[in-house]
Amino acid sequence: MNIDHLKLFVRLANTHNISLAGQELGLSPAVASAHIAKLELSLGVRLLHRTTRKVSLTEEGSAFLVHAEDVLASVEAARAAVGAGSTVATGTLRVTAPASFGRMHLMPELANFLAEHPSLNLDLRLTDTIVDLVDGGFDIAIRNSPLKDSTLVARKLAVDKRVVCASPAYLAKVGTPSNPSDLKELDCITLSGLDTWTFETPNGTESIKVKGRFRTDNGEAVRDACASGLGISIGSTWSVHKQLQAGVLQQILQDYPLVSDTALWVVYPSSRLLAPKVRAFIDYFALVYREPPYWDKHTTV
């Protein structure tokens, strides 16, 4: 059984795209299809369902995948035992991340990351839409929402700490709220679908249904509207740390922390054989965002 054919099959099981899987291994679509056909012929079973848009595993293919991953893992372990095999990150790494976080905290690090891995190409998609990693052919996603797909693996990069803040000008005009219930009488800037804010108080949790004249679906727009004096908002410290440091925004209600278990996660398809390019990305950014993340180190919150 050809090891290269197994590698292609495992990548195909993750990407569901013969062209993309072949490209990652330096193969043309025609050659990749021929390799899979030879693998099926050698096994005497059909491993894939093929359509014009994508491929999916047959029942036999799903059963074979587990063993194929085990074989490849064993091969890598055997090579490592004698010092063989490369752990160099090569090929194209496809990453998707939230737009605001990506612009603010991925982009500034990419030059250093790519300099450390000169054989690696990066394909980055910045979007606030939760994309399907498998259907989209992505290797990694950065997310700040809970993991719902049990076929994926998640590793926490950093706590997504959130604070309530306002501009000094707005607070000078309306006064600084002393407890969460004061927010009911003030203009609050909300992210679409997040107009109930829950606080920890001496008497337990308290949920406040806030209202205001401005709502948006973009976190940076919330921050900028708050800084311009349109009202009070919730902001992740990774988004508002510079404004807090500069005094453009001021944290309020420090004695009533928000109830939140949000975090920043790196998410990738489950596989016993983690590609060097995926591990390189995870290890690099886990170090960059180590606790406490740099955006919280010099911010008083």
Image (cartoon, rainbow, N blue to C red):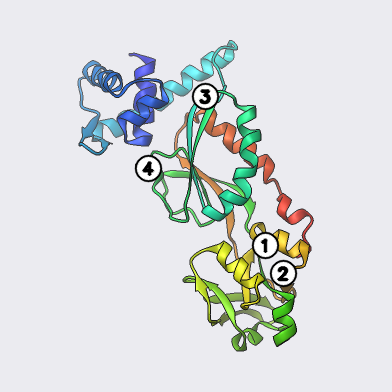
Are the residues tagged 1 and 4 within 8 Å (C-beta)?
A: no
Residue lying at the far bottom in this picture: please name it.
185
Q: Which residue is mark 4?
A: 136
Q: Say which element carries label 3.
A: loop
Q: Are marks 2 and 4 in contact (CB under 8 Å)?
A: no
Between label 2 and label 3, give the one nearer the viewer: 2
Measured in 3D between alpha carbons, the distance from the residue under mark 2 to the one under mark 4, in whole angstroms, is 38 Å
* 293 displayed left or right of 53: right
The residue singled out by tag 1 in the image is 240
Name the residue nearer the viewer: 142 or 109: 109
Do tag 1 and tag 2 residues touch (Cβ < 8 Å)?
Answer: yes
**Relative side of 96 to 299, left or right:** left
Taking the image as shown, residue 301 lies to the left or right of residue 153, namely right
Query: Residue 18: x, y in percent?
Result: 30, 29
* Residue 55: image location, x then y, percent: 26, 35
List the residue tagged with mark 2: 249
Closer mark to the observer between disc 1 and disc 4: 1
